[in-house]
Image: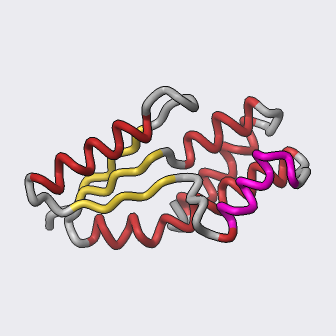
Amino acid sequence: MKKGLFCVIEGLDGAGGSTQTNLLKEFFEKKNVPCVFVKSPEYETEIGQSIRDYLDGKINLKTEQAFLLFAMDVLNSVPIIKEGLGKNKIVIADRYITSTIAYQCANGFSFENALKLKKISLENGLL
């Protein structure tokens, strides 16, 4: 049974990750290779809008709340990812849960707790 490919481009803000994911998507589309594109944060959703408000300083969140908000954004893309992989497509992600862990732990969230939440999510098919 064939499976799709999940490709995640990670990087610091301004490092060119979004540019690279867009170039990769365009490359596959020109070659008529079926692909799906997801990004995190996805600012077009309600959760993404809350993230934008948080980043812009319009709302204040505790460290734990910020971690969970970013993690919920990633969870929103999981059905799209699973569907794409199930249809043998290449799924290209502009950031994923690893970015959430890196950024939020740099802001004070416990790395151990982040890994525990990731493990629980994986065990329950959420990631």
Give the residue at x 31% y 57%: 91
**Is residue 25 left or right of 57 when viewed as pictured?**
left
In this rendering, is residue 78 above or below 100?
below
Q: Residue 73 location in percent, x, y?
A: 62, 60
Q: Tell me which segment is drawn in magenta.
A: 47-58
Q: Nearer the viewer, residue 86 or 48?
A: 48
Q: Residue 50 location in percent, x, y?
A: 75, 61
**Is residue 106 left or right of 33 when viewed as pictured?**
right
Q: Main secondary structure of the magenta part?
A: helix
Q: Quadrant of the N terminus?
A: bottom left
Rendered image quadrant of residue 69: bottom right
Give the residue at x 84% y 49%: 64
Give the residue at x 68% y 65%: 47
**Is residue 66 left or right of 94 when viewed as pictured?**
right
Q: Nearer the viewer, residue 34 or 108?
A: 34
Total marks shown come to 0
| Magenta stretch contains residue 72 | no
Rendered image quadrant of residue 23: top left
In this rendering, is residue 62 above or below 2?
above
Q: Residue 40 location in percent, x, y?
A: 54, 52
Give the residue at x 85% y 46%: 57
| Magenta stretch contains residue 50 | yes
